[in-house]
Amino acid sequence: MLYYTTTSWMMHHWSVSALACGASLVLYSGSPFKPHGYLSIPRLLSSLRVTHFGTSAAYLTTLEANAVRPIADPTLDLSALEAIYSTAAPLPPSTFTFVYTAFPSHINLASITGGTDIISLFGAPCPLLPVRPGSVQCAGLGMAISVIDSSSEPTNPLPVSPPSAPGDLVCTKPFPCQPLTFFGPGGEERYRAAYFDRFPGLWHHGDFVRAEDPQGVYGGGGGGLVMLGRSDGVLKPAGVRFGSAEIYNVLTRFFAAEVEDAVCVGRRREADRDETVCLFVVMAAGKVFGDSVRRAIADVVRRELSPRHVPGVIEEALGGVPKTGNGKKIEVAVKQILSGMEVRTNASVANPEALDWFREWARRANDELPN
């Protein structure tokens, strides 16, 4: 088995566990596109007769974007390949279709989802079940996953209705690889805050999902679990996780005189290849938003953080930033609206007109934002 990963990513530790099954591991260090360009990894798969290959969704979408089909190369023998696993981000439906034209059609292509702290999968592959474009095949063994209505009160988590509606991914029972605490001082408190604050008693993983066939997903029938992005404020473009606070900190540090407020969220529709980071700013009194402000923010974010932190969209929030009665930004609702979800405005929103503005902006910009 070859899982293209660094040793700092959970997939390295996950792949090492394959030794317990008697598997041989292939470890790879360096760019997946060197020394033989896009065929570097396929050449390795061929020469070492790799049976299970794991990678990121970004790698497969790169092959798709460049029309790279290793199976068309007569010098490669990929007949030993049985499975391709993809993670770090949801795999777009179009890439599912592409992979089956680029690699042997007998493979089990699986988009999988789990978590760093559990070194395991909530949504797993299964070679006995159908592969549906854009879907995770089924729940992992020992994982009592469920989809909860995002608008539920913490003390009264309600299943989504209908059962195929989008909601928050939770695990309702303890599972075999569940960590017990976080290391270091205050570990128990930080552990509880990370996973159990949203719905006490339920492991809340922060993913926004939809069960295509709930009976199949939970019952082992392979109904398909569609990953719709993050349900919290964590941004994850190209599989790189960072918090909106990092962007807010840059604005506070360098643009305090120009920008009064801001909301930064990820936008990902079901058919999108990746999440687009969208930053909406409220200008300070007397200040005017324009291309110069947009470029300045992008340049500073690139310099202070990284190119991957630069928002793909920087616009003025003419309706203001939606907040709760106690002044907290309502990032999740904005994220869901931009991603095409139906969001109900409840009494906790202090300025519902702000959400209405985002609904209208999303409608007008639907065909203009990058995928």
Image (spheres, grey):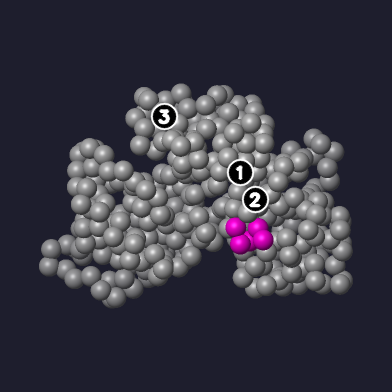
Residue 254 visible here: no
Question: Around disc 1, counting alpha carbons within 10 Å, would you say few (fewer than 14), some (14 to 19), or many (20 or more)?
Answer: many
Q: Quadrant of residue 216?
A: top right
Please tell me which of labels 3 and 1 falls first in the chain: 3
- Residue 338 locus on image (x, y percent): 37, 56
How far separated are the C-alphas under marks 3 and 1? 21 Å
Q: Look at the image and give the residue range highlighted in magenta.
A: 93-97
Q: Secondary structure at mark 1?
A: loop
Q: Secondary structure at mark 3?
A: loop
Camera-side residue: 306 or 14?
A: 14
- Residue 217 locus on image (x, y percent): 61, 37
Marks 2 and 1 close (CB-CB < 8 Å): yes
Q: Secondary structure at mark 2?
A: loop
Please tell me which of labels 3 and 2 falls first in the chain: 2
Name the outermost residue toward the front.
Answer: 162
Marks 3 and 2 close (CB-CB < 8 Å): no
Amino acid found under the numbered disc labelled 3: Leu
- Residue at 39 percent across and 38 percent down: it is 150
Marks 3 and 1 close (CB-CB < 8 Å): no
